[in-house]
Image (tube, grey):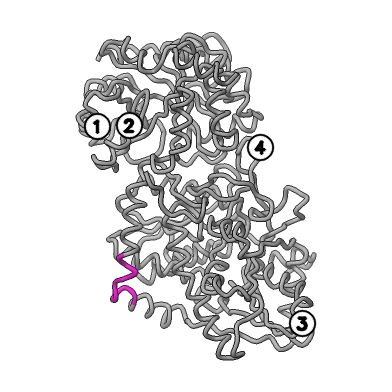
Amino acid sequence: MSEVRVLLAALGFACMSIKETFEKLEGKGALIGYITCGDPNLEMSLKITKEVARGVDILELGIPFSDPIADGATIQAASDRALKAGIRVDDCFRIASEIEGTPKVFMTYYNLVLQRGIDKFLSDCVDAGVSGLIAPDIPIEESDDLLRASEEYGVDLIFVVAPTTDDARMNRIIEHTKGFLYVVSHLGVTGAKDSLYEGTINFIQHVKTVADNRIPIAVGFGISTPEQVENIIKAGADGAIVGSAIINLVSEGMDDEGDFKRLRDFLKSLREAAHRA
Amino acid sequence: MVSEGKFGKFGGMFAPEILVPSLKELDAAFKRFCSDENSKKELEYYLTEFAGRETPLYFCSNLSREYGCKIYLKREDLVHGGAHKLNNTLGQALLAKYMGKTRLIAETGAGQHGIATAIAGASLGMKVDVYMGSVDMERQRLNVFRMKLMGANVIPVETGSRTLKDAINEAMRDWITNVESTYYLIGSVVGPHPYPVIVREFQRVIGKETRRQILESEGKLPDAIVACVGGGSNAIGIFYDFLKDMNVNLIGVEAAGEGLDTEMHSASCCMGTDGVLHGAFTKILQDDDGQIKTSHSVAPGLDYPGVGPEHVYLQEQGRVNYVAVDDSETLDAFEILCKKEGILPALESAHALAHALKIADEFKDGIIVVNLSGRGDKDVETFAAKRGVLV
C-alpha cells in the first residue's frame, strides 16, 4: 500500500507541489498563511482553516505541541486552546485531508513526528495531501532519518535559516531544503509585530543572493500587515508567511458571517500585497 | 552531517536554527575555557573562597549504627546558597564572562538554581533574569524573595503548566531573541549539546572530592553511591568519576510522587519513553501523541518530565541503576535525618537518603555514600503542611 502511495506522490498525483505553486505565480509573491489545527476546537478549526485555505497561496497547518519553544505567546495560546479542546495529531491529519485545492504544509515540533513514527507521519502526509513539513527544532545536523524518509515519500522537508546562520551553513541548508526555504526575519520567536526589524530587508536580500534561485525563499516571524508583506516581497522574497496576525484575528471570535468576512478581507489585503509587489 | 554531543543515541542538538550557531560557539568557547589556566584558577578560587569547597564527606554514626552499614553524606547542602547548584552557576557565569556576555538568564523550578544564578551574578557583576513558573513562585515564595534580594529579576511564567518545563520554554525564547548579548545558564544536565557536558563537567567536583575523601577515611571505594535525579546534575556530578569502578553500585533515585502507577510522578528514567524535549533526545513523560505530560513530586527540584540524556545512556548501558521513591517515603527520610543526625535535607536529597536506608540491608557492613545535594530550609513549610502541623 505504501509503495502505491509513494508512486502516486512521485507522479504528483497527491496535489500541486510547492515548487509548482511558486512557478505558477510567475514571479508574484506567494502568501503563506499559518493556522493552528484544532484552535479553538475541531469543528470551528475546520471552518476557519477552510476559509484561510481559500485566501492564501500555500496553507501552513500547525500541529499543536505542548512545548512550542520557537513560538511566541499567540501561537502558544492557540496550541494550548487546541490541546485543551482535546485535539489529537490524528485530528490534524483529518483537517488537512479535508482541505482541497490549496497546497498544504505541516509545521510541528519533532517529538510529534517521532512518536507517530517518521515513516507513518510522512505516509499519512501523502494520504492527506500534505506536500511539506517544517519542524523548527530539527537542524540539518539531526535530520538524517527525516531527510531519507522525506525523499522516499516525496514530502518536502523545509528547513529554516536565521540571521545567525552564516553563509557556509546557509549553503548546506539550501542543498537539503525542498519546497521553499523558511527565512526567519529577525532574532526572536513567532508573533505579530507592528513594523519590520531593522536588518530584515538586508537579510532577505542576502539570503536571496546566497540562494541564487536554487530554491524559493519565504519570510516569516513578525509579519502581520499588507505593507510588511509588500516590503519583504519587494526585497526579493518569493513568499511571505503570516501566522500570529491571522490567529489574533480569529481568536477574537468567529461567531457570524461578519467575522468570516473580516478574515476574508484581511487575507485578501495580504495576498494582493504579495501579488502586487 | 555529523551530529554532535551524543551519549550513544541520546542527547544531540534539537534546537531552532537561530540557536545552533550559538550552541556551536558555546561548545568551542567551553573547550577553550577548560584549557585556559587563568580561567581554571579563577573558578578554583571562587569554589574554595566563595562557595566553601571542599564540602565534608560526613560519617553518620547514628544512622550507621541503626542500619548496620556505614552511611556517609556528601555535604553539598553546605555549599554557599544551600545546594550543589552553585558549582555549576559559578562555572557557567565565569564562562559567560569569558565569552564577553553581559547578561545571564536562567530557569528555575524550586528556586535553588535561580538563587545560585543570582548569587553568581551578584558576585561577578552580571545582570540576571530568572524565569519561574507562577505555580512554583507561589510554592517557593521565600526563594523568590531571596533571588530578588540578590539583585535578580524574577519573571513569572504563565504558560502551560506554569512550572519548570514552561520556565525552560520561556528562557529558551528569551535566548532566541537576545542570543547575541545573553548567556543562557541552564541548571541541569539537560538541554541541547553542549549543555549536558558543560553542567556535568562543572558538577564533577562532587565526585572527585568524594573519591579522595572516602579513600582517605576508609582506604577503599564505597559499595554504593546514591543520588537523586530530576534533570540529574548532582547525580552525574558524583557518579562520573566512579563510572569505571565497576564494584561501586551507582543508583539514581527519581521521584515516584504519589506512585509510579499514578500519573503523579516525575520518574522519566523509570517510566518515560524515548523522545525529544528541550533540545535533547532522551526519555520523557509523554502521551502517545508525543505531548509532554505534567510531572509531579513533593520535591520541586525533581518535578520535571524529562531527564539528562547521559543518564538514559548510563541506564541503557546498565552502569547506573535507576529507581524511584515516593513522596511519603521521602517525608519519612527527611524526618529521620533531622532527628538522628541533626541535618535538615532538601526534599530532593531526601529521596536519595530514603532509598539508601531501604537498601542498607543489602550492604551489611558495607559503605553507602548519599549525595546530600541540598539543605531543606526551603521545604520546612511543605513538610509541616504534609504532616498537618501549623508553623
Tell me the number on the disc at residue A183: 2
Mark 1 Cα-neighbour bin, 10 Å: few <14, some 14–19, many ≥20: many
Question: What residue sits 47% from the left and 22% below the top?
Answer: A249
Write the start and end of the magenta stretch as one range.
Answer: B32-40
Tell me the number on the disc at residue B364: 3
Judging depth in this view, the residue of B108 and B208 nearest the camera is B208
Tell me the number on the disc at residue B288: 4
Q: CA distance from mark 4 to mark 2?
A: 32 Å
- Answer above or below: position of A195 versus B385: above
Mark 2 Cα-neighbour bin, 10 Å: few <14, some 14–19, many ≥20: many
In the rendered image, residue A191, in percent from the top left (x then y), is placed at 41, 33
Quarter holding residue A226: top left
Q: CA distance from mark 1 to mark 2?
A: 8 Å
Q: Is residue B36 magenta?
A: yes
Q: Amino acid at mark 2?
A: Val
- Answer above or below: position of B117 versus A20: below
Residue B83 at least partly seen: no
- Answer above or below: position of A247 versus B150: above
Tell me the number on the disc at residue A207: 1
Q: CA distance from mark 2 to mark 3?
A: 63 Å
What chain letter is assigned to the residue under label 1? A
Q: Amino acid at mark 4?
A: Asp
Judging depth in this view, the residue of A39 and B356 nearest the camera is B356
The quarter in which the C terminus of chain A is drawn is top left
